[in-house]
Image: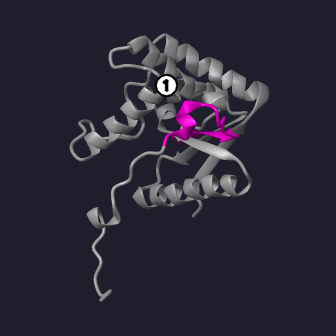
Amino acid sequence: MQPWMARVLTGAAKDRLIAAVQAAFDANEPDHKQEVQYYPAEFFEPFLGRRRKVGWDLYGRLGIARGENAKMKAQHRRNFQFFDAPVGIVFTIDRRLATGSWLDYGMFLQNVMTAARIRGLDTCAQAAWTHWHTAMRPVLGLADTETVVCGMALGHADPAAPENAMETERTPAHSFAQFAGFD
């Protein structure tokens, strides 16, 4: 069904979106009612520990210690400038579609990221944009039926940036897969 829609932005168009969302961010006006519940209301193990580890590893690489809330907020704000990438993409889906379309969308996003890598580009998928759909709507001209899936930064990664050298730990396959018939 190809349920994906994308706004690919650069230059002044990207700058307008960044200005609108960062203004809402600075005013601390997120959309408290997300269109889609992206994460559980309360994290639980093992997902809570995994999420925290990635966050603290990232902040550690950036020299941000626990309790440095202003620095954490400044780093989070960088999402809303697509981490300085020259191209920003906002992906949306028709809100009337169901789980299967979201699964298809995930495969599509992975293919976008793989295609970018093959062409020597880097990406960063960004769930953070989903909290700011109200600020985004007038800038992007989103239809009432569209729900923001995520944003994505597209460009060349800065090899000198500490966050770009970070590799997240992965659980071993035997912890989530059962293998049978391989004897």
Horizontal side, residue 82 vs residue 101: left or right: right
Could you tell me residue 109's position as x and y percent? 57, 53
**4 over 82 or under it: above or below:** below
- In the rendered image, the residue lying farthest to the right is 11
> Foreground residue, 106 or 84?
84
Give the residue type that dot 1 points to.
Answer: Leu
**Residue at x 56%, y 24% (from the top left corner):** 78
Q: How many marks?
A: 1
* In this rendering, position of residue 27 left or right of residue 39: right
Q: Position of residue 89 (x, y in %)?
A: 65, 40
Is 167 inside the magenta-drawn segment? Answer: no
- Region in magenta: 146-166
81, 5: nearer the viewer: 81
Q: Is residue 141 left or right of residue 106?
A: right
Secondary-structure class at tag 1: loop
Label 1, residues with CA under 10 Å away: few <14, some 14-19, many ≥20: some
Q: Residue at x 33, y 61 (%)?
A: 172
Residue 29 appears in the picture as rendered: no
Q: Residue at x 32, y 86 (%)?
A: 182
Determine whether 1 is above or below 30 in the image.
Answer: below
Displayed quadrant of residue 68:
top left
Residue 41 visible to an observer of this rendering: yes
Question: Is 157 a magenta residue?
Answer: yes
Type of colouring: one colour
Q: Position of residue 77 (x, y in %)?
A: 52, 21
**Image quarter (top left, top right, bottom left or bottom right) of the N terminus:** bottom right
Task: Name the residue beneath numbered marker 1.
Answer: 62
Of the 4 image quadrants, the one containing the C terminus is bottom left
| Direction left: furthest residue | 45
Q: Is residue 179 above or below residue 55?
A: below
Q: Residue at x 70, y 40 (%)?
A: 155
Residue 73 position, x and y percent, is 45, 17
